[in-house]
Image (spheres, rainbow, N blue to C red):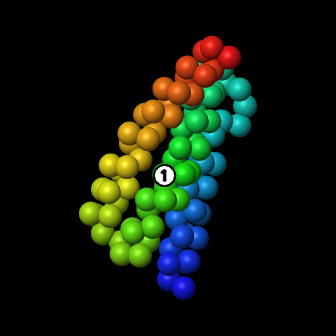
Amino acid sequence: MINFIAALVAVGFGYLLFRIIKPKTDSGGKEVYYARVFLAWALFVSTSLYIQPFTNNPSVVNIIFWFKMSIPFSVVAIIAGFLYGKFR
């Protein structure tokens, strides 16, 4: 039951980051719009998967693990989104 609650909280954090980062309108050009959309989806997925250890056992080590996994994933998503918007 605790793992289900941890997964639910992790998905909730991921959705919160998704709603904060995803632009509401097409502002700043297509490249920036798609970069932010890809970043929002990337952080939703990485947060849903990698913040579960933090929800089970809140510690600095677990949050650093999430940062280590999310930052490279986010950089790749921003670059992919920017290139997608540029050549779309």
Left or right: residue 46 compared with residue 28: left
Q: Residue 14 placed where, x, y %?
A: 55, 56
Q: Residue 78 placed where, x, y %?
A: 50, 30
Give the quadrant of residue 71. top left
Give the quadrant of residue 8. bottom right
Looking at the image, is 64 positioned above or below residue 42? below
Looking at the image, is 2 positioned above or below residue 78? below
Q: Quadrant of the N terminus?
A: bottom right
Left or right: residue 47 compared with residue 68: right
**Can you name the residue that lies furthest to the right here?**
25
Q: Which residue sits at x=38%, y=55%?
A: 66
Looking at the image, is 33 positioned above or below residue 60? above
Q: Quadrant of the C terminus?
A: top right
Q: Residue 15 placed where, x, y %?
A: 61, 55
Viewer can see residue 32: no
**Can you name the residue that lies furthest to the bottom here?**
1
Q: Which residue sits at x=54%, y=51%?
A: 45
Viewer can see residue 66: yes
Q: Residues within 10 Å of mark 1 (few under 14, many from 20)?
A: many
Tell me the element at label 1.
helix
Q: Which residue sits at x=44%, y=62%?
A: 51
Left or right: residue 75 compared with residue 36: left
Q: Which residue sits at x=62%, y=28%?
A: 34
Q: How many marks?
A: 1
Report which residue position mark 1 lands on: 46
**Can you name the residue that lies furthest to the top here?**
87
Q: Amino acid at mark 1?
A: Ser
Query: Is 26 in front, or is 8?
Result: 8
Q: Residue 29 placed where, x, y %?
A: 64, 18
